[in-house]
């Protein structure tokens, strides 16, 4: 009797924050992984433990260019996801979402692979419905400084469903809410990174506005579990994957401060353009279809995240 064939996975953005954690999970499960990354925000150091492994392959490639590979599953994560990075070259960000998704769907169609799109809660924009269910269509500025990312992900979702309708391509669409954990970049400008890096450097913590905006923070291990369940399941999506626990930005700052240096002050700066005032997922669909919900509360997940940043800032310590 022949042995079962090992699942062949392609992860775009596989050397990035989420992609590298997904790589770990799939490699530990005994599957084959091809990691595709152009290293704009990804890093070889995130996946170096797998380099040279017979089931692992690393290809430097930009998803805006087509590529031909034989795979069973495509996890399409490639796209800069923090404002600092996606606003660095907004035209390239829009191209990555549109052309990158177009190229990966073309590959999925050719080889009969299932494709999972890592979409985002940013498709909801600055929501007028709170918390946000998947049925909410969003409130997005089409011409603002965040539009390259927000509208890019919206067109990526559109492409997925058009490929499904026109060509029968198997798709899975997940809407990722704020995620944090080890392997985040210290300079990515996200609120968790900002507060931890400022606190570790002994600087005041910067609140934009008065800190009353809300976010929901999902630890990376929980997020990856939800992603894998979505890919393995039968539900197409879109499906919210995030932690419904809602915190104000000020509460987050205080949690970080008390863990690192309770004496640091909080200072206020003007709000950036189009910054959403509130963000919280309704995850009833994920609970029902994937039997998934996050297990790790923010208070617990901050500890390994702070340890990671401490190591990043003081590698020899």
Image: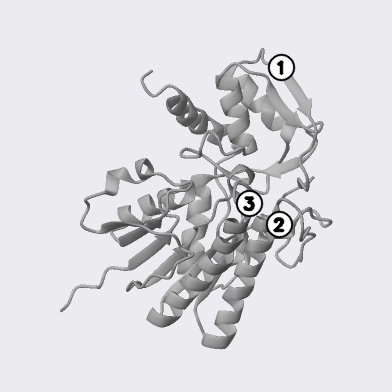
Q: Is residue 121 left or right of residue 54?
A: right
Asked if the residues shown at circle 1 and circle 3 are in contact, with their CB atoms under 8 angstroms apart, the answer is: no
Task: Single out the mark in the foreground, 1 or 3.
Answer: 1
Residue 167 image position (x, y, % from top left):
52, 86
Give the residue drawn at x 63%, y 48%: 87
User: Which numbered marker is on residue 177?
Assistant: 3
Vertical position of residue 222 compared to residue 172: above or below: above
Residue highlighted by disc 1: 265
**Real-space CA distance between mark 2 and mark 1, rounded to the nearest whole angstrom:** 33 Å
Quadrant holding the N terminus: bottom left
Quarter where residue 275 is shown: top right
Give the residue drawn at x 46%, y 24%: 313
| Secondary element at image label 3 | loop
Q: Is residue 233 left or right of residue 193?
A: left
Which residue extends farthest right? 128
Residue highlighted by disc 2: 147
């Amino acid at each position: 009797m022949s042995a079962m064939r090992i699942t062949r996975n392609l992860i775009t953005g596989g050397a990035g924050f989420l992609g590298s954690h997904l790589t770990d999970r799939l490699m530990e499960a005994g599957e084959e992984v091809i990691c595709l990354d152009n290293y704009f925000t990804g890093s070889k150091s995130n996946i170096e433990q797998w380099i040279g492994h017979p089931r692992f392959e690393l290809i430097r490639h930009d998803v805006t260019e087509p590529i031909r590979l034989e795979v069973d599953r495509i996890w399409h994560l490639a796209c800069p996801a923090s404002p600092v990075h996606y606003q660095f070259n907004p035209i390239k960000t829009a191209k990555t979402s549109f052309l990158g998704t177009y190229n990966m769907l073309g590959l999925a169609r050719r080889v009969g692979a299932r494709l999972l799109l890592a979409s985002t809660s940013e498709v909801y924009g600055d929501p007028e419905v709170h918390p946000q269910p998947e049925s909410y269509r969003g409130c997005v500025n089409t011409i603002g400084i965040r539009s390259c990312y927000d509208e890019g992900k919206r067109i990526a979702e559109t492409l997925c469903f058009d490929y499904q309708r026109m060509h029968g391509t198997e798709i899975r669409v997940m809407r990722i809410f704020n995620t944090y954990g080890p392997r985040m970049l210290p300079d990515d400008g996200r609120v968790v990174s900002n507060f931890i890096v400022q606190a570790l450097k002994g600087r005041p913590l910067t609140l934009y506005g008065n800190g009353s905006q809300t976010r929901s923070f999902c630890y990376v291990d929980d997020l990856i579990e939800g992603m894998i369940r979505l890919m393995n399941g039968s539900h197409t999506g879109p499906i919210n994957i995030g932690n419904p626990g809602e915190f104000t930005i000020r509460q987050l700052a205080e949690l970080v401060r008390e863990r690192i240096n309770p004496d640091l002050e909080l200072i206020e700066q003007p709000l950036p353009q189009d910054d959403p005032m509130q963000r919280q997922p309704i995850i009833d669909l994920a609970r029902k279809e994937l039997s998934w919900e996050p297990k790790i509360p923010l208070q617990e997940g901050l500890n390994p995240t702070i340890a990671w940043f401490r190591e990043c800032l003081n590698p020899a310590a």
